[in-house]
Every structure is written in structure tokens, then in C-alpha cells.
Amino acid sequence: MGSAVLDRPTVAEEDIKQFHREGFLVARQLFSKEEIDGIRNRFMEASADGPIPGMSDSSGFSPSDPLSKYPRAMQPHWHPDSEAGMLARKYIIDGRIHDYLQPIMGEEPAAVQSMFYFKPPGARGQDLHQDNYYLRVAPDTCYAAWLAIDDCDEENGTLVVVPETNTMDIVCPQVADASQFFTTEHVEVPEGHTPLAVIMKAGDVLFFNGSLIHGSYPNTSPDRFRRSLIFHYVPASSDKLSSGYKDPMLFDGTVISIDAAVGGGPCGTVATTVFH
């Protein structure tokens, strides 16, 4: 499955139980320092002159916004002609990710999205949200594998999750605070729940459920990036998937077909992009 790995992880039954109980799981040091350095270097080289042609979602940022030079790269695995895209294509079907996702899902996963976030010093965050609001996977949900390319903590805007919201329905979002967040959706933290900052080292992977409320706050560090390579997956047996996520791919590279989600959905729209 995917790239050859000599030391494949074994996922403990208790880890799978934790994922289904809390909605997330951190796999520590799943990727090596050499692999992380290679990913970081390729994406920084690709962005040396600013937004990456054909990948970067650079609309709507003022010249003074740190994200104007370092907007997120969307679907780099669709661009295997570039070195950064080639790495995204390699790692989106990496066997180590499969070895976590398959027992979590209980079936074969299919890859549908890749993103690279630079999150430079001073960048705004992404307000709390649920991924399946965008992907519209049915009858199950989507699943994320969030690979830390830098050490992540509260100062540089690590990911924040709200444990045990993974069994919630999709909530219709409110409007986010544009001074703090660069995207527009905001989901309230339910009564009785508390957001948790997930502290990670480069090479750690955070797996989480598509209904889990999560987001990130601004990068207040004076000089530290918070880069991440993010993949989204759906069960291969899914009946529906929002139409913006073309060519679902199994871990052996086979492309499968999933019918497009149509109609309004619970919040009146069918979105086609997910942000972190």
C-alpha cells in the first residue's frame, strides 16, 4: 500500500477506542526528520517567489497580510509535475497513514484532498468548524490526517480540537471574526465541552473525524512558521461526496467513483473547499 515503509505502525485497540470516543488521535513521530525536512524544503522552494502558480488560494488578502505571500496550497497532489506536488502525491497514499485509517474506518479509505499550510508569523487562524460541512460525505463522514511540518504549540497557532464533538450533527456556522480568522465560518463550542490545544512535534500526525469541531488561532510567534501537510479521506464505500473533490484514490493508486452530493445540505449550501 502506498510507499514502501520498513517499520509499519501497529495501531493499538485502545487508540481506536480513543478515536471513536474523543474524535481524534495523535500518532507520534509517524514521519522521520528527513522526510519532514524534504517536505518543508520542497514547499518553501516552490513558494520562494510568492504564491505557487496553479496551487495557491491567494484571493482576498491585502499586501500587508502575511498570508498574501504564503497562502495555502490546495490539492498539490494534483500537480505531480512539481517536486512539491510529487511529494504530496507520494505521502497522501503512504502506508503508515493507511495503517491508522483502515482500522479507524473499518474499511478501505480513499484520498480526496491535500493541502499545505504555511501559517507564517503573524498569520490569522482558522475559526472553529467541522470538515464534513464542506465535504458532505454520506452515509459516514470524512477523516483528516494532519501532518505537522513544524513543532506546533499555542504560540504559533497549533490546531485546537473540541473532544467528544465527533458524534454531533453538522452545525450551521455563524460568521467568524475577520480580525482573528481568515475564513468566514464559526461553530460555537457546545455547552459542557472545552477546546484543547494539540501540542505536536514535527513528524506527528493528528487523525480526526469530520464532525469534530476544530480550528486554530493566530500565529503570535515573531519568527516561527506553523507549516502542515493535510490530507482528507473518505470511506471507499461512500455514497456521496461534494463535487469539488474529484478522483477519489485508493492507497494502491486506483481512482474510484463516488456520486456527487447535491441539494442544499443541512445549512443550505454545498461547499467544495475545506480549510484549516
Image: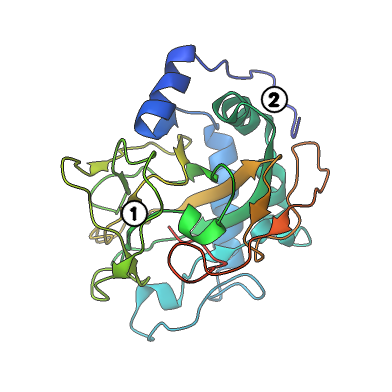
Residue 89's x, y, as percent?
Answer: 71, 49
Q: Quadrant of the C terminus?
A: bottom left
From the image, tell me which residue sits under label 2.
5
Q: Position of residue 130 (x, y in %)?
A: 41, 53
The residue that appears at 61% across and 65% down in the rendered structure is 46
Total residue callouts:
2
Q: Are marks 1 and 2 in contact (CB under 8 Å)?
A: no
Residue 24 vertical position relative to residue 267 in the rendered view, above or below: above
Q: Quadrant of residue 199?
A: top left
Q: Quadrant of residue 273?
A: bottom right
Position of the N terminus, as image quadrant, is top right
Q: Is label 1 or label 2 in front? A: 1
Marked residue nearer the N-terminal end (1 or 2): 2
Front residue of 172 and 275: 172
Is residue 123 visible in the rendered image? The answer is no
Q: Residue at x 38, y 40 (%)?
A: 166
Would you say 126 lies left or right of 177 here?
right
Res. 165 mark: none
116 versus 52 height, above or below: above
Q: Nearer the viewer, residue 174 or 223?
A: 174
Could you give the CA–CA distance between mark 1 and mark 2, rounded to whole angstroms? 31 Å
Mark 2 neighbour class, 10 Å CA radius: few under 14, some 14 to 19, many 20 or more:
few
Q: Is residue 209 above or below residue 72?
A: above
Q: Nearer the viewer, residue 49 or 257?
A: 257
Alpha-carbon neighbours of circle 1 within 10 Å: few (<14), some, or many (≥20)? many
* Quarter where residue 184 is shown: bottom left
Residue 24: image location, x then y, percent: 40, 34
Residue at the spot 54% in from the left edge and 68% down from the top edge: 270
Q: Which residue is mark 1?
A: 215
Position of residue 19 relative to residue 261, above or below, is above
- Amino acid type of the residue tagged 2 in the rendering: Val
